[in-house]
Every structure is written in C-alpha cells, then in structure tokens.
Image (cartoon, rainbow, N blue to C red):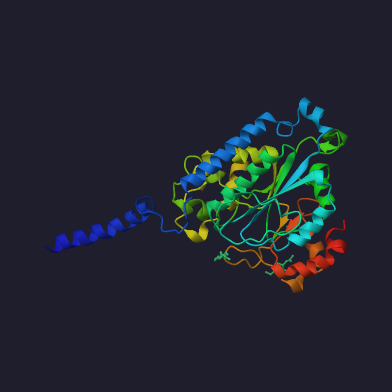
Amino acid sequence: MFTTQFLLVFSLLLSLPILFLLAPRIFPPHNPSIPISPSDEQDDLDLFRKATAVAASSSFVTHYPSAHAHFTFKSKKLKIAFLFLTNTDLFFAPLWEQFFKSADKNLFNIYVHADPYSNVTKPKGVFSSQFIRNAKRTYRASPTLISATRRLLATAILDDPTNTFFAVLSQYCIPLHSFKYVYDSLISSKSFDFSSSESGPESTQYNVKIEYKSFVEIISKERRLWKRYVARGRYAMMPEVPFEKFRGGSQFFVITRRHALMVIEDRRLWNKFKQPCYREDECYPEEHYFPTLLSMQDPKGCTKYTLTRVNWTGTRNGHPYTYKASEISPVLIQELRKSNYSSSYLFARKFEPNCLKPLMKIADEVIFQD
Ligand SMILES: *[C@@H]1O[C@H](CO)[C@@H](O)[C@H](O)[C@H]1NC(C)=O
Ligand SMILES: *[C@@H]1O[C@H](CO)[C@@H](O)[C@H](O)[C@H]1NC(C)=O
Ligand SMILES: *[C@@H]1O[C@H](CO)[C@@H](O)[C@H](O)[C@H]1NC(C)=O
C-alpha cells in the first residue's frame, strides 16, 4: 500500500520536469500574438512574386555593376525610397515636408504603410498620395511588422526600378540632416561609411559608388539573444536557423535594392519567424528577421550598423528613450549625429509628438544645415 502511494507520488514528481520540457510542443501557445490570416499571406505572396518578376525584367540597378548598368546610368538617376511604417498620424510630417522640399523630385520616392485599423489622417503635401493601398493591420512585437515592411519594400520595388536604397522609418523618426547630405552620403560619398575599405578614385564610376552596402544593424553577442531565440519553443527555429546564426538589430534600416529583393524572395526564414511566440515579453521578431536573413545570405554586403540613432539608456518595456519637447536643442541634434561607424547618423528616434514645434524652429538653421 505504502509503496504504491510512494511510487505514484514519485512518478508524478518525475513527470513534472518532463512535462515542463515538452509543454511548448504539447500545449498551444498562450501568447495573444495574432496569426496572419491565409488570405493576407496569399495577398503578400502575390505581391512579392509580382515584384520579383518585374525586378528581374528591369534589372539595371539590381545587378549593378554590369556593362548594361553603365549604359543606362546616364539617363536614369538613382533614387532613395523612404518607407514610413505607422499606426498613428505622421507627427513629424511638416518636418519631413521641409526635408523633401529642397530635394530634386527625381531623387526620391515616399511610401507610407498606415495600419488601416487606426485612423491615420493623411497629411497634405508630399505624403498625401503616398499611402499604399495594400496596407494591413499591424501589432507591436509581432510578425505583422515584418509583413508590413516587406509589403513596403515590394511596393517600392514594383513602383520604380530606379529605387536603389530603401530607408525604413517610423512616425517617431526625424531627419538629422538635409536631403542632399543624406543622398550624397548613401549614393556618392567615399568616406561616409567607416567600415568600408573603398577609397581611391577607382571606387566610384560615373560619380556613383561601385558597391553599395546595406546599413542594417547586426548583433550576435547580446544578453537576451537566447531568450529571444527560444521564444517560439526550444527547437522551433531549427533546422533553418541554428542559434549561432540568429541575430538581433534595429527594425529601422537602409538597405540596397539587391537586399530588398532578397528579403521579399525569402520564404524559408519567414516560415519560422511568422510563428507565434510562447513568451510575449521576449518576442520581437521584427528586430531579428532582417538582421538574421541578411547576415545569413550576404554578411559582406552589410555594414552591420544602423543610421538611425536611438537612445536605449533606461529602456522600459522594450521602448527606447523618448525625447521631450523641452530637450530639443541644437546641442541635442549635434549630439545625436555623432556616430562611431560613419560620418554621422542620418535619422533619429523616438520623439514625443509635441517635439514638432521646437524641431521646426531649429530645422533650417540646425537640422538641415550641413
Ligand atoms: C476611427 O474612427 C471611427 C469613426 O470616426 C471610429 O468609430 C473608430 O472607433 C475609430 N477607430 C480608432 C481605432 O480610433
Ligand atoms: C539618453 O537617455 C537618457 C535618459 O534615459 C538621458 O539622460 C541621456 O541624456 C540621453 N542621451 C542622449 C545622447 O541624448
Ligand atoms: C562610441 O564609442 C565609445 C567608446 O566605446 C562609447 O563610449 C560611445 O558611447 C560610442 N558612441 C556612440 C554614439 O555609439
């Protein structure tokens, strides 16, 4: 009698750790992370396929450098696609408006992905007709942010074959320089990127750089990386993404057309990263998908750092420090520009919406002065 009870208790106790180990596989995720519907997924797939096909047939920038590229360069200017991802009004639209006002219209395009479930007011001016029609609902810390970014990339690829760099920004981002400075830094400067070995006259032809790199942060040593890796279950990312290949970084980046195509062509990693997490507090797939994919497929083509300054001191709940109106000053702008990796940061986040007024005050004399 006694031994039976003992055995029962003993085996129950023994089964606890086993249950604990297997739980993620047995029980469905309790995380409220909403799965992406099959019809949304299909919409995106159709868009990505179309963009890939069109890109393949108008490949002059994509497969640059090539003889063909040199031939077409003189007649076509390279553009920067500015991709805004938002679920609120674009607080700093007037500042960006001023940024774009000084720019040659042939050197940029704007695309806005606004969550259709949040009532985003379309600002007048350069942003008004740039809201993409296929925008879908987005949730913080979820694969929907990856989808939205890929949707923006695909739309920009489809829209204009001369879109060469793709800069992903949010409603909390501001420019730290004039358009001219941003354009020259990305397209023609030989000294902007400190990590580049390019120097000397042979590195540019027809006044553009021979080789473009993506400015995407890629972090491999970080305290929380393991927790983030196992957030979907211990073996959920295998075999496609072993832990040694898992990376972290900012979801706000500037990538080349070649990499933008790589991102929208990917199915393998997306199938892993789109899975819901078990741990909500460690689930930020948008901070891992892009750096992991690009570092797996083309590490040499990435600078491994971002051009968007962000202040992580005193971070709370996964949010970076948000600057207040009273903190805006010429000194802050100078401070935010300082980078260890390039001549300067080009953008910064995050700012409270009421920073607009003090930012506009110093726009012409400080921000766009360089
Ligand atoms: C958007 O606006 C509509 C009508 O003005 C309102 O019914 C709805 O609740 C609003 N939605 C959000 C998310 O604010
Ligand atoms: C970053 O944020 C902290 C507050 O968390 C602030 O004290 C500091 O001045 C900020 N750094 C910069 C460069 O703005
Ligand atoms: C640059 O590097 C120094 C030394 O490692 C560090 O103290 C500083 O915070 C870095 N600055 C930026 C803007 O990352």
Ligand 1 is in which quadrant of the figure?
Answer: bottom right
Image quarter of the C terminus: bottom right
Q: Please report the residue visible at 47 percent of the width from the left and 48 percent of the height from the top.
A: 37
Q: In the displayed structure, does residue 2 sit left or right of residue 298?
A: left
Instruction: Give how far across and how far down residue 351 sits, in percent.
Output: 70, 65
Residue 183 screen position, x and y as percent: 81, 47
Regarding residue 299, the answer to whether it shows in the image is no
Looking at the picture, tell me which residue is in the foreground, 270 or 196.
270
Which quadrant holds residue 365?
A: bottom right
Q: Residue furthest left?
A: 1
Q: What residue lies at 57% left-to-right and 48% top-to-bottom?
A: 147
Q: Place residue 61 in its image quadrant.
A: top right
Measured from the top left, where is residue 359 in percent x and y? 79, 66
Q: Is residue 100 visible?
A: yes
> Where, by quadrant of the figure, is residue 360 drawn?
bottom right
- Which residue occupies the extreme bottom position in the image? 326
Residue 113's place in the image compared with 300, above or below, is below
Residue closest to the eye, 330 or 295: 330
